[in-house]
Amino acid sequence: MSDSMPNRPAVDAMITECRLDGPFWGALKRELLLSYRRKSDLVNPLIFFLMVATLFPLGVSPDPTFLADVAPGVVWVAALLATLLSMDSLFRSDFEDGTLEQILLSPQPLYLVVLAKVLAHWMLTGLPLTILAPLLGVMLFLPGDGMWGLVLSLLLGTPTLSLVGAIGAALTVGLRKGGVLISLLVLPLYIPVLIFGSAAVQGAVTGLPLGGYLAILGAMLSLGLVLAPLAIGAALRISVSG
Amino acid sequence: MADKKWLPRWFYQLASPRWCYDITGKLLPIFVIAAVLTLVVGTVWALAFAPADYQQGNSFRIIYIHVPSSILAQSCYMLMAVAGAIGLIWKMKVADMVAKCCAPIGASIAILSLATGAIWGKPTWGSWWVWDARLTSMLILFFLYLGVIALNSAIESERTAAQSTAVLALVGLVNIPIIKYSVDWWNTLHQPATFTLTERPAMPSEMWLPLLVMVIGFYCFFAVAMMLRLRNEIIQRERRSSWVRALMTN
């Protein structure tokens, strides 16, 4: 199983495994396993996240009070860019080796498979970013009260980023130079998440109630969970058939 | 009975590029005349005869460009999304072309709306730009148009490009209610809607009547721009068909 061409019994075993667990868990397991085998790709978005946050004190001003003011926005923008950067590879390797065609042809519901892929993507980028965020908060002198707001808003916001970004990735997977185009397509749709996410952190810093902002982030997430997989599925079918 | 038959036939005829080319050729002069008339009458009325605002003086007159272009930029996006959906569902060639033609027109009208807003903002608010919900959501609309144009030009196959941009346009549709209700949901610097279908405008009729004429004029102008682009697109895509060849050789 370690080389790139798995032998026949291994393939059979994988098929049985998927059948036993159903399409969602099968796809999720496959994604996580594939990512585990390329560990360096997992760390790259996190390093990028750290580096972008380092640029601001060096580029703008190292003054603690100034940094504390901009910290919510900087952490959120850095998380958003790190997610965006990892988006291009979501369907790319599956498209290039033909797996994507097999997924589309398979009798499994595309909705669930797509949802599993996005969930795996979030578990490997959004979740680590969320866990790492308090460290960046400390680096940028974010007041202690804001930490919970930061973690909670990222926890609710980053899955939405993954879902919306996957639509862009699905639309551009057939193109050779998809990278920059994804940002053009997806960034306008990321703006609302950014606004409410960083507003939640600001609110937490100033001691305002967070409920409203988190509710809106949760509403965007539920809307995304229901509708985005449909758009991703449609976009994948178009990209593969075109 | 006759009426019942008429609607589907009309709908199917619309799917034929040739029929569409012919009908737009007949409609075009009517809309050109209507657009020129309403825009000239509206502009002269608005700039010379409408009374000045009691607070803003003459600077408010840019409303006669700003409001129609803002309304049109949103309508154009709706048309693009609806045409894209029709193309996606019924695989209608003409709907694909309409959706493609909407994007550049919509982007230019959105930039006109943003620019006139900035010019109006300078004397009234004291700055060219404020990060207020209405302005930001309008800017997002402009970015969405740019994304649609970029995606459309990046994909070589016409059919795939049309389908992909239709999906993107439909996803971006979530922004339209945000723009529309941003002035009601947030306490913004931007004033509430000038026109609503259900209530009388807050300004006197000498002021809003020319605005109404300008809005109609902008829609007529949009129809003209749309038809010109659409006819161009039809000719280009159907260049191998016999009727286009016959048309070009005559």
Image (tube, coloured by chain):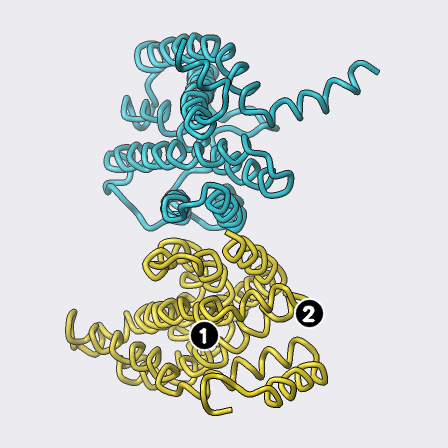
Chain colours: A yellow, B cyan
Q: Quadrant of residue B5?
A: top right
Q: B238 or A9, which is in the foreground?
A: A9
How far apart are labels 2 and 1 at the CA level? 31 Å
Q: Chain of mark 2?
A: A
- Residue A95 in the image: x percent, y percent? 48, 66
| Above or below, A128 relative to B229 | below
Image coordinates of residue A30 in percent, x first then y, are 56, 82
Of helix, strand and loop, which one carries label 2? loop
Tag 1's secondary structure? helix
The answer to whether residue B136 of the structure is visible from this angle is no
Q: Amino acid at mark 2?
A: Gln
Residue behind mark 1: A154
Query: Residue B124 placed where, x, y %?
Result: 28, 35
Q: Which residue is mark 2?
A: A108
Q: Residue furthest bottom?
A: A2
Amino acid at dot 1? Leu
Q: Residues at marks 2 and 1, common chain? A: yes
Which quadrant is the N terminus of chain B positioned in? top right
Image coords of residue B181 (percent x, y)? 52, 44
Q: In the image, which disc is placed on residue B5? A: none
* Side of B132 relative to B77 (left or right): left
State which quarter of the image contains the C terminus of chain B: top left
Q: Residue at x 32, y 25 (%)?
A: B62
- Front position in the image: A2 or B111: A2
Report the side of B141 relative to A65 (left or right).
right
Which chain is indicated by disc 1? A
Label located before the other in sequence (2 or 1): 2
